[in-house]
Image: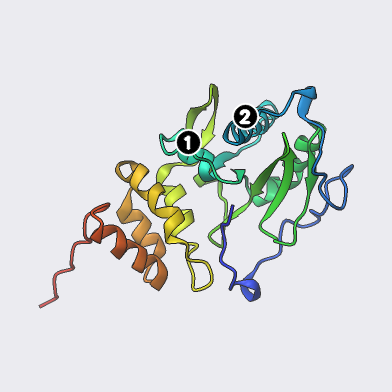
């Protein structure tokens, strides 16, 4: 799942210190990694992603990690589309990334570090798992994880990123090099009544691409127009 635009390489912060390939892993991910506990791969791709999300969520809960489900599976948990994207995403704090990687490895998953320095990756049921510790160029915080809502994800309860934080993470990541309005529009439609749009606007400031997206949402009657500020006398 794309969380950060492609034009920010010069502004990137270093990832969690010392976090490289998880101990016991391989330099390149196996496309045929063992399924946890020998379970067969579900035939349906959406169901495979859900099963992977449930497995990872259960592992993180069992070890008491602070985390929140994000991405398209989080949208699904909030009542959005069942047409999931290409992976399952989880948010953790940067300082917890190494411990989370160890937990996943102990659970039988292949864990590795991609070139991007804002996440680590794993494989579960042959599905990609993204463990994200930075959203829209900002570190995941304990406050954000505390705001997460515990929801049922295909019968497994786990913390899910709050709708306002979820939409902010998508809209704030828009830039001249990453501006896929088409992917985020149906999410905004599905969750619009659950989102504090004023807070999302404030968090995005006057950045041009988010502003253009808000204008589009207004013209499509997805959100109400922003109230014009009264001119000072």
Residue 54: which numbered mark, if any?
A: 2
Compared with 43, 20 (above or below) is below
- Lower position in the chain sequence, tag 2 or tag 1: 2
The residue shown at (35%, 68%) is: 212
Whether residue 146 is visible to the viewer of this picture, yes or no, is no
Secondary structure type for disc 2: helix
Question: Residue 232: x percent and y percent?
Answer: 14, 75
Secondary structure type for disc 1: loop
Q: Quadrant of residue 108?
A: top right
Residue 3: which numbered mark, if any?
A: none
User: Relative to the observer, which residue lies in front, 168 or 180?
Assistant: 180
Q: Are marks 2 and 1 in contact (CB under 8 Å)?
A: no
The residue at which mark 1 appears reads as: 82
The residue shown at (74%, 41%) is: 123
Question: Residue 203: x percent and y percent?
Answer: 40, 60
The residue shown at (59%, 32%) is: 50
- Quadrant containing the C terminus is bottom left
């Amino acid at each position: 799942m794309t969380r950060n635009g492609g034009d920010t390489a010069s502004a990137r912060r270093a990832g969690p210190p010392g976090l490289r390939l998880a101990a016991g892993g391989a330099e390149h991910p196996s496309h045929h990694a063992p399924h946890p506990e020998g379970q067969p791969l579900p035939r349906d791709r959406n169901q495979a992603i859900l099963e992977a999300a449930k497995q990872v969520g259960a592992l993180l809960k069992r070890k008491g990690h602070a985390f929140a489900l994000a991405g398209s599976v989080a949208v699904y948990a909030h009542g959005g589309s069942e047409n999931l994207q290409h992976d399952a995403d989880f948010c953790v704090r940067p300082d917890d990334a190494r411990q989370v990687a160890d937990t996943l490895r102990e659970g039988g998953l292949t864990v590795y570090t991609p070139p991007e320095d804002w996440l680590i990756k794993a494989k579960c049921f042959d599905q990609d798992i993204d463990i994200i510790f930075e959203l829209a160029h900002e570190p995941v915080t304990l406050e954000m994880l505390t705001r997460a809502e515990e929801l049922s994800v295909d019968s497994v309860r786990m913390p899910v990123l709050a709708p306002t934080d979820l939409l902010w993470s998508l809209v704030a990541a828009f830039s001249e090099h990453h501006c896929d309005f088409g992917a985020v529009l149906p999410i905004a439609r599905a969750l619009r009544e659950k989102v504090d749009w004023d807070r999302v606007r404030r968090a995005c400031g006057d950045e041009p691409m988010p502003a253009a997206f808000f204008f589009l949402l207004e013209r499509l009657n997805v959100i109400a127009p922003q109230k014009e500020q009264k001119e000072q006398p």
